[in-house]
Image (cartoon, rainbow, N blue to C red):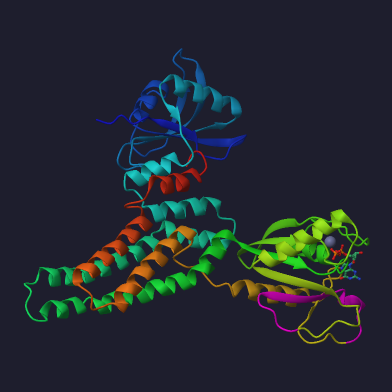
Amino acid sequence: MSHRTTIFARSSGGGRAGVALFRISGPSAGEVLDRFCGGRGEPRQARLVSVRLDDGSLLDQGLAIWFPSPASFTGEDVVELHLHGSPAVERRLFEALTEAGLVAAAAGEFTLRAFEAGKLDLAQAEGLADLLEAETEAQRRQALGQLGGRLSKQANDWRAELIKALAFLEAAIDFPDEEDIPQEIAERAMPTLENVLDAMQRAVAASSAGRAIREGTTVAITGPPNVGKSSILNRLAGEDRAIVSERAGTTRDVVAVRLSIADRLVTLLDTAGIHETEDEIEQIGIARAKTAANQADLRIVVADATNPSLARITQAPMTLFVANKIDGRKERLPEGWVGVSATTGAGWAQFEHCLEALLQGEGGASVLTRDRHVELVRGAVAVLERCVAHAHVEPEILANEVSRTLRRLDELVGLVTPDEVLGEIFSSFCIGK
Ligand code: GDP
Ligand code: ZN
Protein backbone atom coordinates (compact mmCIF):
# COMPACT_ATOMS: atom_id res chain seq x y z
CA MET A 1 0.00 0.00 0.00
CA SER A 2 1.55 3.26 -1.08
CA HIS A 3 1.24 6.37 1.05
CA ARG A 4 3.04 8.52 -1.44
CA THR A 5 1.86 11.98 -2.16
CA THR A 6 0.86 13.08 -5.63
CA ILE A 7 3.00 16.00 -6.71
CA PHE A 8 2.58 18.68 -9.34
CA ALA A 9 4.74 21.39 -10.93
CA ARG A 10 5.10 23.49 -14.00
CA SER A 11 7.86 21.70 -15.93
CA SER A 12 8.39 24.28 -18.65
CA GLY A 13 10.08 27.57 -17.81
CA GLY A 14 8.20 30.10 -15.68
CA GLY A 15 6.46 33.29 -16.74
CA ARG A 16 4.27 33.88 -19.79
CA ALA A 17 4.49 31.42 -22.68
CA GLY A 18 2.34 30.18 -25.55
CA VAL A 19 2.08 26.80 -23.90
CA ALA A 20 3.10 25.67 -20.44
CA LEU A 21 3.66 22.05 -19.45
CA PHE A 22 2.33 20.97 -16.07
CA ARG A 23 3.32 17.59 -14.73
CA ILE A 24 1.55 15.50 -12.10
CA SER A 25 2.99 12.29 -10.61
CA GLY A 26 1.67 9.92 -7.97
CA PRO A 27 -1.20 7.62 -7.07
CA SER A 28 -4.00 10.17 -7.63
CA ALA A 29 -2.75 11.48 -10.99
CA GLY A 30 -5.47 9.50 -12.83
CA GLU A 31 -8.19 10.93 -10.55
CA VAL A 32 -7.10 14.43 -11.59
CA LEU A 33 -7.99 13.53 -15.18
CA ASP A 34 -11.29 11.97 -14.06
CA ARG A 35 -12.24 14.98 -11.98
CA PHE A 36 -11.06 17.93 -14.06
CA CYS A 37 -10.63 16.65 -17.64
CA GLY A 38 -13.63 14.35 -18.16
CA GLY A 39 -11.69 11.07 -18.07
CA ARG A 40 -8.26 9.58 -18.73
CA GLY A 41 -8.29 8.67 -22.43
CA GLU A 42 -5.87 6.29 -24.12
CA PRO A 43 -2.49 5.90 -22.43
CA ARG A 44 0.32 8.03 -23.94
CA GLN A 45 -1.96 9.78 -26.45
CA ALA A 46 -2.47 13.50 -26.51
CA ARG A 47 -6.11 14.46 -26.13
CA LEU A 48 -7.75 17.85 -26.47
CA VAL A 49 -9.56 18.53 -23.18
CA SER A 50 -11.54 21.20 -21.42
CA VAL A 51 -10.20 21.54 -17.91
CA ARG A 52 -13.24 22.22 -15.70
CA LEU A 53 -13.33 23.12 -12.01
CA ASP A 54 -15.73 21.36 -9.61
CA ASP A 55 -18.44 24.02 -10.17
CA GLY A 56 -18.35 23.24 -13.89
CA SER A 57 -16.61 26.47 -14.88
CA LEU A 58 -13.91 26.29 -17.54
CA LEU A 59 -10.32 26.74 -16.34
CA ASP A 60 -8.64 26.37 -19.73
CA GLN A 61 -8.50 24.16 -22.78
CA GLY A 62 -5.41 22.22 -23.77
CA LEU A 63 -3.84 18.82 -24.22
CA ALA A 64 -3.80 16.06 -21.64
CA ILE A 65 -1.61 12.94 -21.75
CA TRP A 66 -2.06 9.98 -19.44
CA PHE A 67 1.00 7.84 -18.60
CA PRO A 68 -0.14 4.99 -16.34
CA SER A 69 2.51 3.36 -14.13
CA PRO A 70 5.06 1.94 -14.74
CA ALA A 71 5.69 3.30 -18.28
CA SER A 72 6.31 6.88 -17.22
CA PHE A 73 9.27 9.10 -16.35
CA THR A 74 8.87 8.56 -12.60
CA GLY A 75 7.48 5.03 -12.87
CA GLU A 76 4.34 6.30 -11.10
CA ASP A 77 1.04 7.34 -12.70
CA VAL A 78 1.87 10.56 -14.51
CA VAL A 79 -0.30 13.19 -16.18
CA GLU A 80 0.92 15.95 -18.45
CA LEU A 81 -1.25 18.99 -19.07
CA HIS A 82 -0.28 21.39 -21.84
CA LEU A 83 -2.20 24.57 -21.07
CA HIS A 84 -1.85 28.24 -21.89
CA GLY A 85 1.20 29.67 -20.17
CA SER A 86 -0.26 32.55 -18.22
CA PRO A 87 0.19 33.31 -14.53
CA ALA A 88 -3.63 33.23 -14.03
CA VAL A 89 -4.02 29.74 -15.54
CA GLU A 90 -1.12 28.47 -13.45
CA ARG A 91 -2.45 29.99 -10.22
CA ARG A 92 -6.01 28.64 -10.69
CA LEU A 93 -4.72 25.17 -11.65
CA PHE A 94 -2.44 25.00 -8.62
CA GLU A 95 -5.31 26.04 -6.34
CA ALA A 96 -7.53 23.30 -7.77
CA LEU A 97 -4.81 20.65 -7.46
CA THR A 98 -4.02 21.71 -3.89
CA GLU A 99 -7.74 21.51 -2.99
CA ALA A 100 -7.73 18.00 -4.48
CA GLY A 101 -5.00 17.03 -1.97
CA LEU A 102 -1.97 17.20 -4.26
CA VAL A 103 1.23 18.93 -3.18
CA ALA A 104 3.69 21.17 -5.02
CA ALA A 105 6.80 19.25 -6.04
CA ALA A 106 10.17 20.10 -4.51
CA ALA A 107 13.16 20.78 -6.77
CA GLY A 108 14.23 17.56 -8.47
CA GLU A 109 11.40 15.53 -6.91
CA PHE A 110 10.22 13.98 -10.19
CA THR A 111 13.77 12.83 -10.95
CA LEU A 112 14.23 11.59 -7.38
CA ARG A 113 11.12 9.45 -7.80
CA ALA A 114 12.42 8.17 -11.14
CA PHE A 115 15.71 7.28 -9.39
CA GLU A 116 13.87 5.52 -6.56
CA ALA A 117 11.84 3.55 -9.10
CA GLY A 118 15.07 2.45 -10.81
CA LYS A 119 14.29 4.36 -14.02
CA LEU A 120 17.77 5.86 -13.95
CA ASP A 121 20.73 5.53 -11.63
CA LEU A 122 22.46 8.31 -9.77
CA ALA A 123 25.12 8.95 -12.42
CA GLN A 124 22.39 9.25 -15.05
CA ALA A 125 20.39 11.60 -12.84
CA GLU A 126 23.49 13.78 -12.58
CA GLY A 127 23.80 13.65 -16.37
CA LEU A 128 20.19 14.83 -16.63
CA ALA A 129 20.89 17.71 -14.22
CA ASP A 130 23.90 18.68 -16.33
CA LEU A 131 21.89 18.47 -19.56
CA LEU A 132 19.30 20.87 -18.14
CA GLU A 133 22.13 23.30 -17.33
CA ALA A 134 24.12 22.78 -20.54
CA GLU A 135 25.12 26.04 -22.26
CA THR A 136 27.78 24.80 -24.70
CA GLU A 137 27.91 21.99 -27.26
CA ALA A 138 30.66 20.22 -25.30
CA GLN A 139 28.53 20.34 -22.15
CA ARG A 140 25.49 19.05 -24.03
CA ARG A 141 27.42 16.12 -25.51
CA GLN A 142 29.08 15.19 -22.23
CA ALA A 143 25.79 15.40 -20.29
CA LEU A 144 23.95 13.32 -22.91
CA GLY A 145 26.66 10.66 -22.68
CA GLN A 146 26.31 10.48 -18.93
CA LEU A 147 22.50 10.45 -19.12
CA GLY A 148 22.84 7.62 -21.64
CA GLY A 149 24.84 5.62 -19.07
CA ARG A 150 28.46 6.25 -20.05
CA LEU A 151 29.68 6.53 -16.45
CA SER A 152 27.22 3.91 -15.21
CA LYS A 153 28.48 1.38 -17.75
CA GLN A 154 32.09 2.10 -16.80
CA ALA A 155 31.32 1.70 -13.09
CA ASN A 156 29.42 -1.53 -13.74
CA ASP A 157 32.25 -2.93 -15.88
CA TRP A 158 34.71 -2.24 -13.08
CA ARG A 159 32.33 -3.86 -10.59
CA ALA A 160 32.01 -6.97 -12.76
CA GLU A 161 35.82 -7.28 -12.94
CA LEU A 162 36.25 -6.80 -9.20
CA ILE A 163 33.58 -9.42 -8.50
CA LYS A 164 35.57 -11.85 -10.66
CA ALA A 165 38.69 -11.11 -8.61
CA LEU A 166 36.72 -11.46 -5.41
CA ALA A 167 35.57 -14.93 -6.50
CA PHE A 168 39.20 -16.11 -6.65
CA LEU A 169 39.93 -14.63 -3.24
CA GLU A 170 36.87 -16.26 -1.72
CA ALA A 171 37.72 -19.61 -3.29
CA ALA A 172 41.14 -19.28 -1.65
CA ILE A 173 39.54 -18.50 1.72
CA ASP A 174 37.24 -21.53 1.48
CA PHE A 175 40.04 -23.84 0.43
CA PRO A 176 41.08 -26.40 3.11
CA ASP A 177 44.36 -25.17 4.50
CA GLU A 178 46.80 -27.37 2.58
CA GLU A 179 50.19 -26.46 1.26
CA ASP A 180 50.35 -23.37 -0.97
CA ILE A 181 47.21 -23.93 -3.01
CA PRO A 182 45.13 -21.11 -1.45
CA GLN A 183 47.88 -18.61 -2.15
CA GLU A 184 48.05 -19.70 -5.78
CA ILE A 185 44.32 -19.25 -6.22
CA ALA A 186 44.44 -15.85 -4.54
CA GLU A 187 47.17 -14.73 -6.91
CA ARG A 188 44.88 -15.31 -9.86
CA ALA A 189 42.91 -12.28 -8.70
CA MET A 190 45.92 -10.02 -9.18
CA PRO A 191 45.94 -9.43 -12.97
CA THR A 192 42.28 -8.40 -12.80
CA LEU A 193 42.91 -6.06 -9.89
CA GLU A 194 45.86 -4.53 -11.74
CA ASN A 195 43.77 -3.96 -14.87
CA VAL A 196 40.98 -2.25 -12.97
CA LEU A 197 43.50 -0.17 -11.06
CA ASP A 198 45.14 0.95 -14.29
CA ALA A 199 41.79 1.88 -15.89
CA MET A 200 40.72 3.81 -12.80
CA GLN A 201 44.00 5.72 -12.66
CA ARG A 202 43.57 6.72 -16.29
CA ALA A 203 39.99 7.85 -15.68
CA VAL A 204 41.12 10.02 -12.76
CA ALA A 205 43.93 11.51 -14.85
CA ALA A 206 41.45 12.40 -17.63
CA SER A 207 38.86 13.81 -15.26
CA SER A 208 40.07 17.40 -15.14
CA ALA A 209 39.02 17.71 -18.79
CA GLY A 210 35.52 16.50 -18.01
CA ARG A 211 35.22 18.85 -15.09
CA ALA A 212 36.50 21.74 -17.20
CA ILE A 213 33.70 21.08 -19.69
CA ARG A 214 31.07 20.82 -16.96
CA GLU A 215 32.20 23.73 -14.82
CA GLY A 216 33.73 25.89 -17.55
CA THR A 217 37.17 27.43 -17.79
CA THR A 218 38.08 30.73 -16.19
CA VAL A 219 40.31 33.00 -18.26
CA ALA A 220 41.73 36.14 -16.63
CA ILE A 221 42.84 39.08 -18.78
CA THR A 222 45.66 40.87 -16.98
CA GLY A 223 48.30 43.49 -17.68
CA PRO A 224 49.13 47.13 -16.97
CA PRO A 225 46.48 49.85 -17.21
CA ASN A 226 45.40 51.22 -20.58
CA VAL A 227 46.86 48.48 -22.77
CA GLY A 228 43.41 47.47 -24.05
CA LYS A 229 42.31 44.64 -21.73
CA SER A 230 38.69 45.79 -21.63
CA SER A 231 38.69 46.36 -25.39
CA ILE A 232 39.89 42.78 -25.94
CA LEU A 233 37.21 41.39 -23.64
CA ASN A 234 34.54 43.39 -25.43
CA ARG A 235 35.68 42.18 -28.83
CA LEU A 236 35.75 38.55 -27.63
CA ALA A 237 32.30 38.92 -26.10
CA GLY A 238 31.00 40.62 -29.25
CA GLU A 239 29.44 43.41 -27.21
CA ASP A 240 30.44 46.17 -24.81
CA ARG A 241 30.56 44.55 -21.42
CA ALA A 242 33.49 46.32 -19.82
CA ILE A 243 34.13 50.05 -19.75
CA VAL A 244 36.79 51.18 -22.20
CA SER A 245 38.39 54.48 -21.34
CA GLU A 246 41.46 56.53 -22.13
CA ARG A 247 41.79 57.15 -18.42
CA ALA A 248 43.98 54.57 -16.74
CA GLY A 249 42.44 52.77 -13.78
CA THR A 250 38.88 52.69 -15.13
CA THR A 251 38.34 48.98 -14.56
CA ARG A 252 38.40 48.89 -10.78
CA ASP A 253 36.68 45.63 -10.05
CA VAL A 254 36.75 42.29 -11.79
CA VAL A 255 34.18 42.11 -14.61
CA ALA A 256 33.09 38.56 -15.48
CA VAL A 257 31.56 37.60 -18.83
CA ARG A 258 30.38 34.11 -19.70
CA LEU A 259 30.70 33.04 -23.31
CA SER A 260 31.32 30.01 -25.47
CA ILE A 261 34.68 29.72 -27.24
CA ALA A 262 35.42 26.61 -29.31
CA ASP A 263 32.41 24.85 -27.74
CA ARG A 264 33.73 25.52 -24.25
CA LEU A 265 32.04 27.51 -21.55
CA VAL A 266 34.47 30.28 -20.67
CA THR A 267 34.25 32.85 -17.93
CA LEU A 268 36.36 35.81 -19.03
CA LEU A 269 37.57 38.09 -16.27
CA ASP A 270 38.55 41.67 -17.02
CA THR A 271 40.76 42.90 -14.23
CA ALA A 272 42.06 46.22 -13.03
CA GLY A 273 45.37 47.17 -14.58
CA ILE A 274 48.14 46.01 -12.31
CA HIS A 275 50.42 48.95 -11.42
CA GLU A 276 51.60 51.09 -8.50
CA THR A 277 48.96 53.47 -7.19
CA GLU A 278 48.13 55.63 -4.17
CA ASP A 279 44.38 55.38 -4.80
CA GLU A 280 42.94 53.05 -2.13
CA ILE A 281 39.95 51.87 -4.14
CA GLU A 282 42.25 51.16 -7.07
CA GLN A 283 44.56 49.21 -4.76
CA ILE A 284 41.65 46.96 -3.77
CA GLY A 285 40.85 46.42 -7.46
CA ILE A 286 44.48 45.53 -8.15
CA ALA A 287 44.57 43.06 -5.25
CA ARG A 288 41.43 41.42 -6.63
CA ALA A 289 42.95 41.36 -10.12
CA LYS A 290 46.01 39.52 -8.82
CA THR A 291 43.88 36.97 -6.98
CA ALA A 292 41.68 36.42 -10.05
CA ALA A 293 44.72 35.96 -12.28
CA ASN A 294 46.28 33.46 -9.88
CA GLN A 295 43.13 31.41 -9.50
CA ALA A 296 42.12 31.40 -13.18
CA ASP A 297 42.62 28.28 -15.30
CA LEU A 298 44.17 30.32 -18.12
CA ARG A 299 45.63 33.82 -18.38
CA ILE A 300 45.78 36.33 -21.20
CA VAL A 301 48.61 38.76 -20.42
CA VAL A 302 48.17 41.96 -22.44
CA ALA A 303 50.85 44.53 -23.25
CA ASP A 304 50.95 47.62 -25.43
CA ALA A 305 52.45 46.83 -28.84
CA THR A 306 53.37 50.49 -29.35
CA ASN A 307 55.70 50.21 -26.40
CA PRO A 308 59.13 49.75 -28.06
CA SER A 309 60.55 48.05 -24.97
CA LEU A 310 58.22 45.07 -25.36
CA ALA A 311 60.36 42.25 -24.05
CA ARG A 312 60.96 38.84 -25.49
CA ILE A 313 58.87 36.59 -23.27
CA THR A 314 59.64 33.32 -21.59
CA GLN A 315 57.06 30.54 -21.65
CA ALA A 316 54.57 30.46 -18.78
CA PRO A 317 52.09 27.64 -18.29
CA MET A 318 48.51 28.21 -19.43
CA THR A 319 49.25 31.78 -20.44
CA LEU A 320 48.81 33.61 -23.72
CA PHE A 321 50.88 36.78 -24.31
CA VAL A 322 49.03 39.33 -26.40
CA ALA A 323 50.52 42.58 -27.73
CA ASN A 324 47.54 44.86 -28.37
CA LYS A 325 47.42 48.03 -30.52
CA ILE A 326 49.41 46.33 -33.27
CA ASP A 327 47.86 48.97 -35.56
CA GLY A 328 50.33 51.49 -34.08
CA ARG A 329 53.50 49.40 -34.36
CA LYS A 330 55.91 49.34 -37.27
CA GLU A 331 58.71 47.01 -36.20
CA ARG A 332 58.36 43.24 -35.78
CA LEU A 333 57.15 41.86 -32.43
CA PRO A 334 59.65 39.99 -30.27
CA GLU A 335 59.14 36.24 -30.20
CA GLY A 336 56.28 34.73 -28.21
CA TRP A 337 53.78 37.58 -28.59
CA VAL A 338 50.52 37.32 -30.48
CA GLY A 339 49.91 40.72 -32.07
CA VAL A 340 46.32 42.02 -32.23
CA SER A 341 44.37 45.19 -32.51
CA ALA A 342 41.18 45.27 -30.47
CA THR A 343 40.21 48.34 -32.46
CA THR A 344 40.73 47.19 -36.05
CA GLY A 345 40.53 43.42 -35.49
CA ALA A 346 43.99 42.86 -37.03
CA GLY A 347 45.52 39.53 -35.94
CA TRP A 348 42.26 38.49 -34.34
CA ALA A 349 41.85 35.10 -36.11
CA GLN A 350 45.35 34.07 -35.02
CA PHE A 351 44.64 35.20 -31.43
CA GLU A 352 41.38 33.21 -31.29
CA HIS A 353 43.17 30.22 -32.75
CA CYS A 354 45.82 30.33 -29.98
CA LEU A 355 43.14 30.76 -27.32
CA GLU A 356 41.16 27.81 -28.68
CA ALA A 357 44.31 25.67 -28.69
CA LEU A 358 44.90 26.52 -25.03
CA LEU A 359 41.29 25.67 -24.19
CA GLN A 360 41.40 22.41 -26.17
CA GLY A 361 44.63 21.56 -24.34
CA GLU A 362 42.35 21.10 -21.36
CA GLY A 363 41.17 17.93 -23.15
CA GLY A 364 37.92 16.28 -24.24
CA ALA A 365 34.99 14.62 -22.53
CA SER A 366 35.71 12.17 -19.73
CA VAL A 367 33.60 9.67 -17.83
CA LEU A 368 34.24 11.34 -14.46
CA THR A 369 32.71 14.80 -14.54
CA ARG A 370 32.22 15.80 -10.91
CA ASP A 371 34.32 16.03 -7.75
CA ARG A 372 32.05 13.36 -6.29
CA HIS A 373 33.06 10.87 -9.01
CA VAL A 374 36.75 11.68 -8.77
CA GLU A 375 36.81 11.36 -4.97
CA LEU A 376 35.10 7.96 -5.04
CA VAL A 377 37.38 6.58 -7.77
CA ARG A 378 40.49 8.06 -6.09
CA GLY A 379 39.48 6.25 -2.91
CA ALA A 380 39.06 3.01 -4.87
CA VAL A 381 42.48 3.53 -6.49
CA ALA A 382 44.15 3.95 -3.08
CA VAL A 383 42.64 0.68 -1.82
CA LEU A 384 43.53 -1.26 -4.99
CA GLU A 385 47.10 0.08 -4.93
CA ARG A 386 47.46 -1.36 -1.43
CA CYS A 387 46.03 -4.72 -2.60
CA VAL A 388 48.42 -4.93 -5.55
CA ALA A 389 51.41 -3.90 -3.44
CA HIS A 390 50.59 -6.52 -0.78
CA ALA A 391 49.52 -9.37 -3.01
CA HIS A 392 50.79 -11.97 -0.54
CA VAL A 393 48.77 -11.04 2.52
CA GLU A 394 45.94 -13.25 3.70
CA PRO A 395 43.16 -13.64 1.09
CA GLU A 396 40.64 -12.61 3.79
CA ILE A 397 42.28 -9.21 4.06
CA LEU A 398 42.43 -8.75 0.30
CA ALA A 399 38.81 -9.82 -0.11
CA ASN A 400 37.80 -7.30 2.50
CA GLU A 401 39.65 -4.51 0.67
CA VAL A 402 38.15 -5.44 -2.71
CA SER A 403 34.69 -5.36 -1.13
CA ARG A 404 35.40 -1.82 0.06
CA THR A 405 36.29 -0.83 -3.50
CA LEU A 406 33.03 -2.34 -4.71
CA ARG A 407 31.09 -0.22 -2.22
CA ARG A 408 32.61 2.94 -3.68
CA LEU A 409 31.45 1.92 -7.13
CA ASP A 410 28.00 1.19 -5.70
CA GLU A 411 28.00 4.70 -4.34
CA LEU A 412 29.00 6.11 -7.73
CA VAL A 413 25.82 4.79 -9.37
CA GLY A 414 23.66 5.34 -6.29
CA LEU A 415 23.14 1.78 -5.06
CA VAL A 416 24.31 2.79 -1.58
CA THR A 417 24.51 6.54 -1.35
CA PRO A 418 24.19 8.59 1.83
CA ASP A 419 20.98 10.63 2.04
CA GLU A 420 22.88 13.92 2.33
CA VAL A 421 24.60 13.23 -0.99
CA LEU A 422 21.27 12.38 -2.65
CA GLY A 423 19.71 15.50 -1.16
CA GLU A 424 22.51 17.66 -2.51
CA ILE A 425 22.29 16.21 -6.02
CA PHE A 426 18.50 16.32 -6.39
CA SER A 427 18.04 19.73 -4.81
CA SER A 428 20.33 21.15 -7.53
CA PHE A 429 17.60 20.46 -10.09
CA CYS A 430 15.00 23.06 -10.94
CA ILE A 431 11.39 22.71 -9.79
CA GLY A 432 9.36 20.62 -12.22
CA LYS A 433 12.17 18.22 -13.09
P1 GDP B 1 42.53 48.65 -20.27
O1 GDP B 1 42.76 49.70 -19.25
O2 GDP B 1 43.72 47.76 -20.40
O3 GDP B 1 41.27 47.87 -20.03
O4 GDP B 1 42.39 49.38 -21.70
P2 GDP B 1 41.07 49.85 -22.47
O5 GDP B 1 40.45 48.72 -23.15
O6 GDP B 1 40.23 50.65 -21.54
O7 GDP B 1 41.73 50.77 -23.59
C1 GDP B 1 42.55 51.84 -23.27
C2 GDP B 1 42.66 52.78 -24.46
O8 GDP B 1 43.31 52.13 -25.53
C3 GDP B 1 41.32 53.22 -25.00
O9 GDP B 1 41.38 54.57 -25.38
C4 GDP B 1 41.11 52.34 -26.21
O10 GDP B 1 40.28 52.92 -27.19
C5 GDP B 1 42.53 52.20 -26.71
N1 GDP B 1 42.72 50.94 -27.46
C6 GDP B 1 42.34 49.71 -27.09
N2 GDP B 1 42.70 48.79 -28.01
C7 GDP B 1 43.33 49.49 -29.01
C8 GDP B 1 43.94 49.09 -30.25
O11 GDP B 1 43.99 47.92 -30.65
N3 GDP B 1 44.51 50.08 -31.00
C9 GDP B 1 44.49 51.38 -30.60
N4 GDP B 1 45.06 52.26 -31.39
N5 GDP B 1 43.92 51.77 -29.45
C10 GDP B 1 43.34 50.85 -28.65
ZN1 ZN C 1 39.95 48.08 -18.50
Q: Which of the 4 image quadrants contains residue 34? A: top left
* Residues rendered magenta in the picture: 314-331
Residue 79 is situated, as x and y percent measured from the top left of the image, at 40, 34
Q: Quadrant of ligand 1?
A: bottom right
Between 195 and 383, the residue placed more toward the observer is 383
Magenta span contains residue 152: no
Left or right: 104 in relation to 121? right
Residue 3 on image: x %, y %? 30, 29
Q: Residue at left 39%, top 52%?
A: 122
Q: Is residue 137 left or right of residue 433?
A: right
Q: Please provide percent x and percent y for residue 339.
A: 81, 78
Looking at the image, residue 325 lies above or below residue 139: below
- Rendered position, 332 above or below 30: below
**Does residue 282 lie above or below 54 as drawn?**
below
Q: Residue furthest top?
A: 55
Query: Residue at left 26%, top 63%?
Result: 403
**Quick check: 172 above or below 32?**
below
Viewer-side residue, 52 vs 407: 407
Task: Find residue 317 and report its horizontal and vertical position in percent.
Answer: 66, 77
| Residue 325 belongs to magenta span | yes
Left or right: residue 262 versus residue 405 is right
On the question of residue 352 being in view, the answer is yes
Quadrant of the rendering where the N terminus is positioned: top left
Residue 251 visible, this orientation? no
